[in-house]
Every structure is written in C-alpha cells, then in structure tokens.
Amino acid sequence: MQFTCNQDTFAKYLNIVSRVVSSKPGLPILNNVQFESSKGKLIITATDLEIGLNTWIGADVKSEGKITVPAKQLTEFVNSVPSEVIDVTLDNQNFNISSTGNFASLNTMPADDFPAVATVTDNKPLLKLPKDLLVKAVNRVAFAAASDDIKPVLTGILLEISGDSISFVGTDGLRLSRQIVKLDVNSEKDVNVLVPVKALLELAHIVTEIGEDNMIEVYLIEDRNQILFKYGDIDLVSRLIDGQFPEYRQIIPTGYKTLTKLSKNDFLNSLKITNIIAKSVLGNKLILDIDSKGDSVTLSATQTDLGSNKSTFKGNIEGDSLKIAFSSRLLSDVLNHLDSEDIIFECSETVKPGVFKIADDPDFVHLVMPMML
C-alpha cells in the first residue's frame, strides 16, 4: 500500500471516523481504523460493533492494499503536522507516514480480523432527508432518551416513518420529546425502527462538520437488522435496537386548563436563580406557581438545612392559576435544547405532565412528568 493525500482532508475525515472507535474495546483490533486503497480512492473504516463508519476520500494511490492502524495515535499525528501533502507507505507491516520534517511509523494489525461494515450500492434509499431537519430533530429529541442500559429500548430514538413524514421520539420515562419532520418525497414504505441515540448524535455531528451535501439518504439493511445513513462520501451504519418502544401517544395531553406563553431566556434565568437551592433538594425539586391574574410565573425551592428562594417573571397566561412541582434539571434540559425564544407551556393538573411547545413549530412537543407537591 502506498498513497499520498492532503493533510487537511486526511485530518478532517480521520477526526470523524475515529470518534466511533471504542476507548475500551473487548477486541484489540477495535482500537484501529482500517485503510483500503483502491482505484484512486482511500476508504477509511472504523467500528465499535454497534456503529460503523465508512468514508471515501481522494488520494493519489500508487499501490493498493488493506491494513488496520491504531486510531488514536494516527489521528493525533496527522492533526499535528503542517497542512501539506502527506505520504503513506506500508513497509513490512509498518504504517509509515511522513510530511516535511515529520515522520511516524505505526504498528499494524491485519485487516482480515477487522469486522466488516455494511455498504449499499444499487439499493434504492428508503427515504431522503434534508440535513438541517435531521440536526434540528436530533437536537430537540436525543437529550430525552435514557443514558443507562437498564431499559435498552429507552436508549434509542424511535423513528416512525410514514408516507411524507418521520416522527423522532425519545423518552427516559420521566420526560418525552417528539419532533415530526415533513419529507419532500414520500418514503418507499412505512416502518418503525429504534435507532441508538449515539448513532443519531454522530450523524448530526458529521453533517454539521462536513456540510457538503444537503440530503441524507436512509437505507434499511433488514437481513442484518441495521440502518445505514449515507451523506456524501460517508456511510454511517448502526444496529437497530430490538424491543417494544413504550406506547407514548396516550400520555400526550389533548387539551389544557392553563397555557402560558413565555420567554425561554426569562425562564432559564429564573431557573438559574432557583437552582441555587433546588440543586440541593432531593430530585432537584422546585415549585412552579402560575398566577393567571397577575400574568406571572414564580419558581421557588426550599431545602430545610439551607433555606429557600424564589424568582418571578412575566408570561402571557390563559386559563386557571396552577401550582405544580418539577425537577429543575429536567426543565433546564428542555429549555437548553430548544432553538426558539418563544415557548408555550401547557398543563392541566398537578399530577399530569407539563407540556412544552414551540410557538412557531406545531410539530414539536415535550412532556415532563411532575413531582409530588
């Protein structure tokens, strides 16, 4: 194997691919990225057995070959050398990299033992999705998924693909986010799949970093229970999570007794103040007191050993006054992941979920379960 390529291109794609390399893999070869030089293209592959990445970059291929190289050290070296042409040669199983005044030789492992990462060739995509809508949906939904593996189905995002729309749904049992995305062209078929949240976060990172194409192609590899996202010269492949996602529709309220139109920044500022005490309370509990007569919202927290505090801000309130308790952490999470200043908060009773909406987007909803007053 022998090839040359530009340092900036090499570094950009290495940085993306190496993000899926496991820090503590069960198999030593999963510390590595695989290189395959073929027909004027360099194919770089990495996987942690849950997510896999293939990327094709332009290179001057002088001789073809296939090998795996330690990802961390290679990425650090390529990022550190000047932006110029880099020469790579495989010599006696040593991966030799050189640029002006810099040289590294890394040990390799045979590519025969590297797990295969699926690709698609002539398949027709299930659907095509604009990258900006994908990024918006992931930002608004992924944070609501569970971060532990106690219930594996809750560590995924449910994609409900139906006709001209996809619903992205995430929940950890205490909160739920749903963002509906409209498609320009109907999907090839209706299907529900459960995608690990890590895979969608990586995909959002890739399309934000690369920014070359507008559309993401989505493929189902049903015989392997995998989903593949193709964006330009990058394929991201992820396993699908088996299991039954909770039936969530029945818990989304269809009406309200109290509706408050408010400023996200006003709410966040009051949360910051109230959280000085609330962060020391069991469950980060605070009280949200909506006064419809005074058009005001008051957040308060009390901790027996510390004291209490409160913060009030104005809102446009319709309906009844209401007092309800929430975790300040859950409220901060949703507000910090919304990209709109104009927020709508709806609620009906102290024991029913609080509902966050965005004033200019009827396709988004976020539920937060209340705490006992």
Image (cartoon, rainbow, N blue to C red):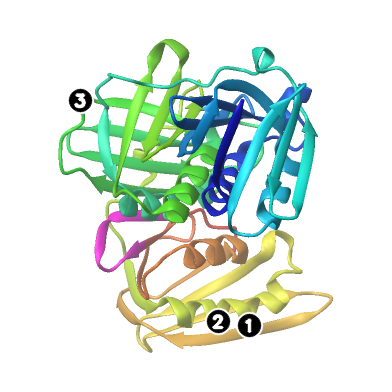
Residue 270 marker: 2
Taking the magenta stretch, the answer to whether it contains residue 214 is no
For the stretch drawn in magenta, the main secondary structure is strand
Left or right: 48, with 58 as reference point: right
Q: Secondary structure at mark 1?
A: helix
Residue 154 marker: none
Can you identify the residue that label 1 sits on?
Answer: 273
Amino acid type, label 2: Ser
Please rate how many residues cluster around mark 1, counting C-alpha atoms within 10 Å: few if below 14, some from 14 to 19, many from 20: some
Magenta residues span 357-367
| Residues tagged 2 and 1 counted as in contact (Cβ below 8 A) | yes
Q: Residue at x 63, y 82 (%)?
A: 273
Residue 188 marker: 3
The number of numbered discs placed on residues in the rendered structure image is: 3
Taking the magenta stretch, the answer to whether it contains residue 364 is yes
On the image, the x and y values in percent for residue 88 come to 65, 37
Distance between the alpha carbons at the discs numbered 2 and 3 = 47 Å
Q: Residue at x 42, y 49 (%)?
A: 207
On the image, the x and y values in percent for residue 170 come to 46, 43
| Frontmost residue, 300 versus 106 | 106
Q: Secondary structure at mark 3?
A: loop
Distance between the alpha carbons at the discs numbered 3 and 1 = 50 Å
Amino acid type, label 1: Ile
Residue 311 position (above or below residue 55): below
| Frontmost residue, 258 versus 136 | 136
Residue 83 visible to an observer of this rendering: yes
Residue 149 visible to an observer of this rendering: no
Q: Secondary structure at mark 2?
A: helix
* Residue at the extreme right: 305
Residue 349 position (above or below residue 31): below
First reached walking from the N terminus: tag 2 or tag 3: 3
On the image, the x and y values in percent for residue 116 come to 56, 17
